[in-house]
Image (cartoon, rainbow, N blue to C red):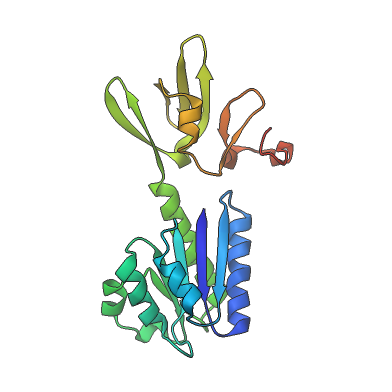
Amino acid sequence: MINFIVCEDNDIILNKNIDIINKIMFNNNISYKIYKFSSYNSELKKLIKEHIENKIYILDIELDNKSGIDIAREIRNNDLNSFIIISTVHSEYLPYTIKSKLLIFDFVSKFDDYENSLSTVIKNILSIYDESKILTITINGSIKKIKLNDILKIEYNNSLNQTSIKTKSKTYYTKKTLKVIEKNLDDRFIKTKDGKIINNNYIIDKKSINKKGVI
């Protein structure tokens, strides 16, 4: 689950941010939720302190009651892992020290091809999430880490009492059951009627997927 937290006091840009997010996520097999705010308030403050996974903040640098930089400072007092994007009028004038100290992922200018720029930044963040997700298994006493994005298919072999994990480059075998492995996968993986788990990103004919995510 990706959690987008958007704080923008201009309704037109706020709605544009929402549209950009929905457009990007429509083409991704990742569940997401959008929290939108037009000002800094108690609900946003509570959300900042809440320990939910995969937060991406898109903050207006100039709000009526608090700056996006001040909100970023508050975020970093509680959370060093979330991604922060600052939308502003003149991003080129903001000092690098602010960006580095607050671990701001990027500044996006509102008046310089905003939609394309913000889309690119969000896609870059999603690719980082994708690359960081791994499945850890043990093979002959050694720990092996497999990127979820590399996995094509997972299936259990009853006769051999083992699970095979087919990736783009090779196939791994483990004693872990499908039920255990499934807990470490994300929304891109779906089950087939014969019990296999496949990566939805590599399915050519997606019309065959039913409402329960089974083909």
The residue sitting at 39% across, 63% down in the picture is 82
- Residue 153 point in image, percent of width and height: 53, 30
- Quadrant in which residue 195 is drawn: top right
Write the residue at 39% across / 67% down. 49
Image quadrant occupied by the C terminus: top right
The answer to whether residue 122 is above or below residue 73 is above
> Which of the 4 quarters of the picture holds residue 173?
top left
In the image, 37 versus 130, the foreground residue is 37
Q: Residue furthest bottom?
A: 64
Residue 200 appears left or right of 56: right
Residue 176 is situated, as x and y percent measured from the top left of the image, at: 42, 24
The answer to whether residue 28 of the structure is visible from this angle is yes
Residue 96 horizontal side relative to residue 48, left or right? left
At horizontal 43% and vertical 74% (from top left) the residue drawn is 45
**Total of numbered circles in the picture?**
0
Q: Does 34 sit above or below residue 200?
A: below
On screen, residue 100 versus residue 119, left or right, reads left
